[in-house]
Amino acid sequence: MQDFNLAALFMLGFLAGGHCLGMCGGIVAALSLQQRQARSHWLLMLAYNTGRLSSYSLVGALVGGIGGLGIASLNIAALQHLLYALANLLLIAMGLYLMGISAFITQIERLGKPLWRIVQPAMQRLLPVRSPWQGLLVGALWGWLPCGMVYTASLSALASGSAQQGALTMLAFGLGTLPNLLAMGAFAEALRSLSRQPLVRWTSGGLICALGLWRLAQVL
């Protein structure tokens, strides 16, 4: 089951590329524009994303550890199933958002805005990026951007019941987002145009909804 969950979180990150364009497109475009002429462009893009994935893994370890303590102390297996079910309901909400049916997931994203108001100025002070190490720090801060997909994956990490599994859950999700964000650095405008096509939105959103329903079926 754990292997299936990791694969499902990877697919979530990959399929929700349209949401990545909306949430991270501005950041990627700004970072790519300042380094587009540099030989180290791709090295810096890898540094940004390595930092971002490190933050996701840290979040996963923290919430997974917290979830494990709660589940162990309360000795309630039903709590783990409830968290898992909530994560997949958010997954379905994300699919509906991509399909243009419901914007509920945007309400969830507002929860992280107070923290982002603190993190964003620190990130801006590191710009312009002049080295991979600086890019790594920028990426680590970028990982705290409020995002419904990240919160969905975090609930799965919380339900995992351990710091190790929580970190793996968030890392699997982050790796799924990696192809889209690397491609965005080079083809931002083309990808943005493609993501707005109704067929693309309905296909990716429908697949994410199907993924959420399939995962829900595992606990019902």
Image: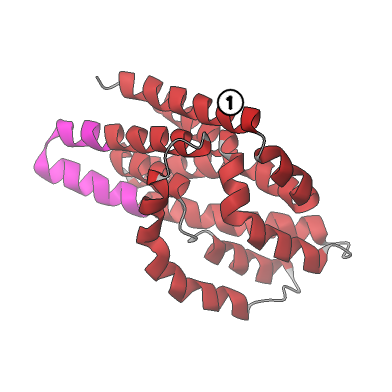
Q: Is residue 145 above or below residue 21?
A: below
Choose top left, top right, bottom left or bottom right for residue 124: bottom right
**Front position in the image: 152 or 133:** 152
Q: Is residue 73 magenta?
A: yes
Residue 97 left/right relative to 87: right
Q: Is residue 200 visible?
A: yes
Residue depicted at 38% across the width and 59% down the height:
110
User: Is disc 1 surrounded by few (<14), some (14 to 19) or many (20+) residues within 10 Å?
Assistant: some
Q: Is residue 1 visible?
A: no
Q: Is residue 90 magenta?
A: no
Residue 210 left/right relative to 73: right
Q: Quadrant of the N terminus?
A: top left
The image shows residue 216 at horizontal and vertical percentages of 32, 24
Q: Main secondary structure of the magenta part?
A: helix
Residue depicted at 30% across the width and 50% down the height:
65
The secondary structure type at the circle numbered 1 is helix
Please name the residue that numbered disc 1 is placed on: 203
Residue depicted at 57% across the width and 73% down the height:
123
What is the span of residues highlighted in magenta in the rendered image?
Answer: 62-83
Residue depicted at 53% across the width and 34% down the height:
10
The image shows residue 168 at horizontal and vertical percentages of 46, 41
